[in-house]
Amino acid sequence: MELNERFQVLLPGSNVAFKASASDTLLASAQRAGVVLTSSCRNGTCRACIARLGEGRVMYRIEWPGLSADEKAAGYFLPCVAYPASDLVVRSFGAD
Ligand code: FES
């Protein structure tokens, strides 16, 4: 995967989509596109930004973002520290 590769991110329940660079966090790419996502710490610990993927893959550069193995397996991710590895469809925001 190239760092300048760009992916499409589709948000839930709307027609909102934005382009995300493989070299930027999803939160940063959303901000750049004018899409406001909930966030607080921006370092993967507070979980304010937690969301769940419907489709696609993300990657992390930190060893263990504030997610359990079960949450990761269920598709939860933290946009403030997650980088896109494919086109993404976000299923929901929040931890439900
Ligand atoms: S903003 Fe705190 S974990 Fe993402």
Image: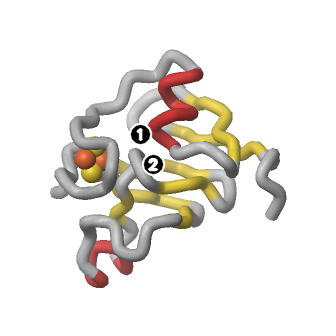
Q: Which residue is mark 2?
A: 90
Mark-to-mark CA distance, 2 and 1:
6 Å
Residue type, numbered disc 1:
Pro
Secondary structure of residue under mark 2: strand
Secondary structure of residue under mark 1: loop
Mark 2 beta carbon near ligand 1 (under 8 Å): no
Res 1 → quadrant = bottom right
- Residue at the image point whose x is 27% and y is 74% from the top: 71
- Whether the residues at callouts 2 and 1 have beta carbons within 8 Å, the answer is yes
Mark 1 beta carbon near ligand 1 (under 8 Å): no
Residue 12: mark in rendering: 1
Query: Toward the viewer: 95 or 64?
Result: 64
Residue type, numbered disc 2:
Val
Quadrant for the C terminus in the image: bottom left
87 displayed left or right of 16: right
Can the viewer see residue 49 in this picture?
Answer: no
Answer above or below: position of 60 versus 5.
below
Residue 78, position as x, y percentages in the image: 36, 54
Q: Residues within 10 Å of mark 1 (few under 14, many from 20)?
A: some
53 displayed left or right of 84: left
Q: How is the image coloured?
A: secondary structure
12 displayed left or right of 28: left
Please count the marks in the image.
2
